[in-house]
Amino acid sequence: DAEVYYDDDADRSRIDDKTVAVLGYGSQGHAHAQNLNDSGVDVIVGLREDSSSRTAAEADGLRVETPADAAAEADIVSVLVPDTVQPAVYEEIEDGIEEGDTLQFAHGFNIHYNQIVPKEGVDVTMVAPKSPGHLVRRNYEAGEGTPGLLAVYQDATGEAREEGLAYAHAIGCTRAGVVETSFQEETETDLFGEQAVLCGGVTSLVKQGYETLVDAGYSREMAYFECLNELKLIVDLMYEGGLGEMWDSVSDTAEYGGLVSGDAVVDEHARENMEEVLEAVQDGTFAREWIAENQAGRPSYTQLREAEKNHDIEDVGEDLRSLFAWGGDEDAESTDEDEK
Ligand code: NDP
Ligand code: MG
Ligand code: MG
């Protein structure tokens, strides 16, 4: 089993006298920068001159420099700009990353697929909170933690893991627990999970369930409630107590029917398709496709996005959500910043 680290495992002296450049002030960036700062670590936020995030970072009392200047001054450079722009930003900062410095990530894509090739002599680590940034910040302020991952890709100084753990401590992750992984494992499981299950699998299941009911003559409203809205109740139960708590909470009819029909719907073909998705992640096919898609100005992505927006379930959902008041306020602010 993987190692799990907590507060007591971290030695904060590994980071307390260091300067950390946090590049980007978005979801993860604002949380890491403010948590590090509140933990007493010297922080510089790296943003381009015309960045729309500058005002926010400065209003939060943080020093802002260009990515190149921030990285040159820092001992640890935390790369928290979007994954698709990281290779270009790395070119701007590369000269300022000296031997003994650390390049720190929150996702392994660019390192694992060689879109960023760090110099020898530099430590390369990952501290990845398993949560959107606003929760990383909110939990820290509440004295609570956010579970996270720790990985070391390159350990030039022999101190990469210790320093990464200290960083995880300073942003509050060791309060909850930090699981040791590798850049490869984090990248491949993250991509597979979001494609096959979390973002891709679930939305396709919802759309096909909805279409099946509507095509059979049932009302769009009923189909929306059954196939999309109620999903939250089921997921909340699974989140709290695994599949067992969900099965215990639904009726015996739902449990029996679900056990019989679930595997019939998501059957061995779906499993074979999942294995293909995993292979494309593992052999780099997906990464190459996504990089090319970005280089070409995102033609397919734009089309797919548009088609998804125009699905009938979005239309009926918008109407229903404005007619009924639901969705507690405590969840409302997580909608646009949520992890992919
Ligand atoms: P965001 O999209 O929130 O980052 C936006 C920030 O990056 C803004 O401050 C923006 O400033 C800046 N930025 C964008 N383009 C550039 C550029 N070309 N040069 C300089 N700065 C730029 O990123 P996330 O926080 O979502 O992701 C950061 C990393 O964290 C990624 O590796 C991601 O995979 C990982 N991660 C994200 C999670 C999440 O919940 N979002 C969860 C776990 C990991 P500007 O105003 O200049 O555009
Ligand atoms: Mg430096
Ligand atoms: Mg993910």
Image (tube, rainbow, N blue to C red):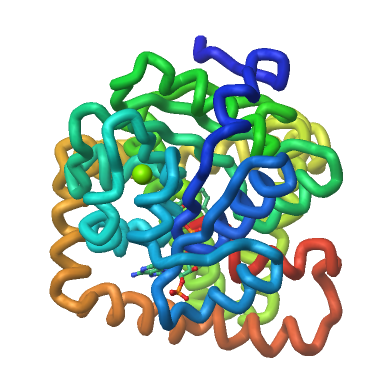
* 72 is higher (above) or lower (below) than 24: above
The quadrant in which residue 319 appears is: bottom right
Give me the residue at 70% from left, 65% from top: 61
Looking at the image, residue 132 sits to the left or right of residue 200; the answer is: right
Residue furthest to the top in view is: 1
For the point 40% across and 34% down, which residue is it?
186
Task: Say whether residue 70 is left or right of residue 42.
Answer: left
Q: How many marks?
A: 0
Task: Give the x, y percent position of residue 235.
Answer: 68, 48
Toward which corner of the image does residue 253 lie, by quadrant? top right
Q: Is residue 242 above or below residue 303?
A: above
Image: 24 above or below 280: below
Q: Is residue 60 something that shows in the picture? A: yes
Q: Position of residue 42 (x, y in %)?
A: 60, 46
**Residue drawn at x 51%, y 80% as measured from the top left:** 52
Q: Residue at x 85, y 79 (%)?
A: 325
Check the image and report above or below for 99 versus 258.
Answer: above
Residue 192 appears in the picture as rendered: no
* Residue 1, image x, y percentages: 51, 10
Front residue of this view, candidates 123 and 174: 123
Q: Position of residue 149 (x, y in %)?
A: 52, 31
Horizontal placement of 140 versus 179: left or right?
right
| Most foreground residue, 21 or 153 | 21
